[in-house]
Amino acid sequence: MNLNLNLLLFFLFVVLSFSALGQVNVLNAERPEEIGVLSENQEEILSNKKYLEYPHVNEGDVMWSKIVYEEIDLSEKFNHPLYFPKDGLYKSERKSMWRTIKDAILDGRVNKIYNDANPNFSELFDKETYIKRLENREGPEVVPLKSMDIVSYKIKGIWYVDKRIGEMRFRILGIMPRGKDMNNLDNDEPVDLFWLWYKDLRPILHEVFVFDDTNNASRITFDQILTSRRFTSRIYAVDNVFNDRPVDQYVDDPFMQLIESERIKNLIRDFEHDLWSD
């Protein structure tokens, strides 16, 4: 009885697999024999070499949106994939996200570095300014800002409801590392370094795979971690009439700041639930 059941399940699996394969390219096939055959463009899109591009969103289809500012604390275990490995352990095949970003800036692949005090990406830093935030050159040796010196990442993103597809989505707009003040090495307090436009980083973050110490066969990039929100964070500000006033400016107690962050998260989740519940 079990043998017959196993054979039946195997037969169904084979049939469904060939059926699924046969449906590939069915809409774009010029001839029947092209069904099930991927074009070069489709192979590139489905490969790990190309990141999933953001779909175009018509402004008229956005029925609700909310800009939020979040902080990803790298000391939390769930966020460790964004923090490790430390610099010096590997030359090129394994990098932390900070090393990936820093190398891209120093190599000129990312050349638009924005003022940390302006989250609207309207004020660029000159090269001398952002290099000083990457390394200290005043002593006899250059002291670089290392991965272990980065304590968190701030991200600016937008939640929006696209009525055309009928769902709520999230998109990262910018990212800012926070870490050691290289202009004042005696200062132990982390500082905001600079804002980066996330679309400038996506091709670079998609080239580097994150190491998974629980599964060496797992292949996921830094871009996939961020765009799929595989991290924990706290909301520290939202867009409001008070010039996007941070939570800590109207809530003094640190514990209550966390409560306020969760309250804002729940408001976003409840909005999506209420939108389609009627």
Image (cartoon, helix red, strand yellow):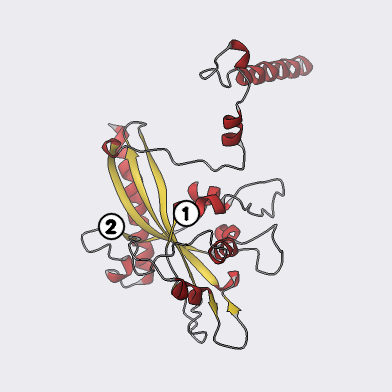
Element class at badge 2: loop
Mark 1 or mark 2, which is nearer to you?
1
- Residue 93 is left or right of residue 107, and the answer is right
Image vertical order of residue 13 relative to residue 176, above or below: above
Q: Please give the count of numbered marks on the rendered protein.
A: 2
In which quadrant is the C terminus drawn? top left
Give the answer, above or below, for where 246 lies relative to 223: below
User: Which residue, as the protein is rendered here, is positioned at the far left?
Assistant: 241
Residue furthest top as drawn: 32
> Does 113 appear above or below 214?
below
Q: Residue 129 placed where, x, y %?
A: 44, 75
Q: Residues within 10 Å of mark 1 (few under 14, many from 20)?
A: some
Q: Nearer the viewer, residue 256 or 264?
A: 264
Rendered location of residue 203, percent (x, y): 54, 50
Q: Position of residue 76 (x, y in %)?
A: 54, 63
Direction from residue 16 to residue 29 in the image, left or right: left
**Label 2 environment density (alpha carbons within 10 Å; few <14, some 14–19, many ≥20):** some
Q: On the image, numbered disc 2 is attached to which residue?
A: 239
Residue 156 horizontal/vertical position (percent): 39, 57
Residue drawn at point x = 62 percent, y = 88 percent:
140
Q: Earlier in the sequence, mark 1 or mark 2?
A: 1
User: Which three-letter amino acid code belongs to the residue tagged 1?
Assistant: Asp
Q: Which mark is residue 109?
A: none
Residue in the picture at 66% in, 55% down: 211
Q: Nearer the viewer, residue 125 or 152?
A: 125
Label 1, on which residue? 200
Picture quarter with the N terminus:
top right
Above or below 271: residue 123: below
Of the residues shown, which amino acid type is indicated by label 2? Asp
Label 1 sits on a secondary structure element that is: helix
